[in-house]
Amino acid sequence: MTRLLPVLTVVGAILLLWYAATVWLNAPWARDQAARAEATLTLPALVADTMTQDRPVLPAPHQVGAELWKTVAATKVTSKRSLVWHGWVTLSATAVGFLLGSGAGILLAIGIVHSRAMDLSVMPWAVASQTIPILAIAPMVIVVLASVGVTGLLPKAVIAGWLSFFPVVVGMVKGLRAPDAMQIDQMRTWTATPGQMFWKLRLPASVPWLFASLKVSVAAALVGTIVGELPAGATAGLGARLLSGSYYGQTVQIWAALVAAAVLAAALVGLVGLIERRALRRMGMAR
Amino acid sequence: MSPVIAAHGLNLTYETRDGPVHALKDVSLSVGKGEFVSFIGPSGCGKTTFLRCVAALEQPTSGTLTVNGMEPDAARRARAYGYVFQAAGLYPWRTIAGNIALPLEIMGFPKPERAERVARVLKLVDLEGFAAKFPWQLSGGMQQRASIARALAFDADILLMDEPFGALDEIVRDRLNEELLRLWAATGKTALFVTHSIPEAVYLSTKIVVMSPRPGRITDVIDSPLPRDRPLDIRDTPEFIAIAHRVREGLRAGHGDAD
């Protein structure tokens, strides 16, 4: 209860601001319509109108809620109109991309820590890869992979991996270098092999760093997948919902997809956090 | 009997941007089996550097150094020594037993023997019952005892200790000094002990090596006339005070001609 109250307070404040913004942003359209009909709106009528428009500039929370209810609970999950189905399409590509990206990130970090040449050569490229706008590179990845016959989930996963490997590289390099000179000297006094140094010292020492970066990386993978769903007229996934919503001015649909993406991101980060707590407790590092 | 550690004309020079630094200059010393030798001196006198040379963590620039009659590197591979650092350096993700077993795993001891050795050294340092605890559940003094146990676990006959109790308070330090003496008497190890504390050096040692900085060198070697069996209150006897006085004089002299 003590933890719930602050959360509810913040949620309440956000809803309040949202409703205020709804009235403010949708009022011009309502006034416009009224002027054309040569009618004048009373304040209560104006407020009511701003919350019931078909294509509002900003849909009211309850409109988004109704859309979510309609597309999540009241539609069969196998239907193409179901947000659950679209969410699943996005989630599966996100999961594959996250595994690809974080796997690549861990391997790159191991290389960077163990090889001076890789340290000097890989890191600038990793940084450069993240400075290229993902919106520019995503269509090219889709097109190039489609031309060699790879379509569907994998191209999106590649874009997700593109975004998600970087936080893992940075976090893991830091984590693998976390052991200090004394700990390394200590291993040397036992004539430890490089392999033992890695498995018994560097890798376990990097675990807290790994999880911190995995949380960033899983959220980035979701963004990557959604961006990957935008080009080439994808028909499935939350990104496709965003795109078709913007084609047809269906702002309610866009916001419903946004909320679904946010919930998905929160769930993914929460899941990584849960695994983190479990792992650290088993390693005796959670107090 | 041949000495356990023999150094002749040992020099170690670091090249730095401000020119060469003489960490060790013409250090000659011999340590016999079962001795407890303390190295005392201000920062930069080379006491830790000497210990690191013995452990083959540093390479002397010139001179000869043998450990158990071997090159330091070969001695290390033959598990000649256990090294205790200033910080306990226990891995937070391993239990106390797991930490003590770590060098045994690295050296390839079979599992049943590891468990048996861990139990034995835990008993030796009075930490039975803490095997399954994680390091953060132990006090600083207990952690350092665990790190000594770890250094003893693989039966090296030399114990190298670099200010192991430097970060602990006086009361804990006194108790650990007493325990260390008991341990040393019980195991018959040769001990090399770096310290900043004159009472600690005099209380523990059969031989005290006084060093001074710039360049790091030995200014005095004192063979202690104190008996091997030492209660804590031996520190109030005239003999003890006389040795402490000589150490202090040595430190002062070393400082005087360096500045």
Image (tube, helix red, strand yellow):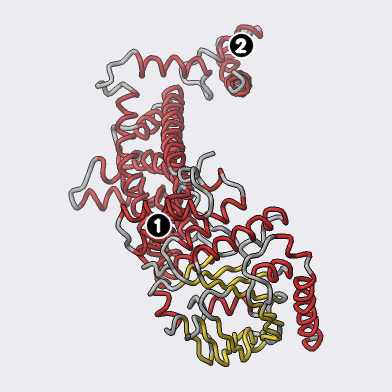
Q: Disc 1 and disc 2: Cα gap in Å? A: 68 Å
Identify the residue at horizontal 69%, vertical 66% (top origin).
B200
Place of residue B17 in the rendered image (x, y in percent of width and height, measured from the top left): 64, 84
Q: Is residue A205 left or right of residue A79?
A: right
Question: Residue A162: which disc?
Answer: none
**In the rendered structure, which disc, 1 or 2, sits on the residue that comes first in sequence?**
2
Residue B193 seen from this side:
yes
* Residue that numbered label 2 is attached to: A46
Q: Are marks 1 and 2 in contact (CB under 8 Å)?
A: no
Q: Is residue A16 left or right of residue A223?
A: right
Place of residue A172 in the rendered image (x, y in percent of width and height, measured from the top left): 45, 55
Identify the residue at horizontal 42%, vertical 40% (top origin).
A282
Looking at the picture, tell me which residue is in the foreground, B142 or A63. Answer: B142
Classify mark 2: residues with Cα within 10 Å, few (<14), some (14-19) or many (20+).
some
Residue type pointed to by label 2: Leu
Q: Are marks 1 and 2 on the same chain?
A: yes
Secondary structure of residue under mark 2: helix
Looking at the picture, tell me which residue is in the foreground, A256 or A43. Answer: A256
Question: Residue A200: which disc?
Answer: 1
Identify the residue at horizontal 53%, vertical 62% (top origin).
A180
Q: Quadrant of residue A129?
A: bottom left
Residue A66 versus residue A124 in the image, above or below: above
> Where the C terminus of chain B falls, by quadrant?
bottom right
Place of residue B125 in the rendered image (x, y in percent of width and height, measured from the top left): 53, 54
Looking at the picture, tell me which residue is in the foreground, B180 or A70. Answer: B180
Which chain does the numbered disc 1 sit on? Answer: A
Secondary structure of residue under mark 1: helix
Residue type pointed to by label 1: Lys
Which chain does the numbered disc 2 sit on? Answer: A
Residue A130 seen from this side:
no
Q: Is residue B8 left or right of residue A283?
A: right
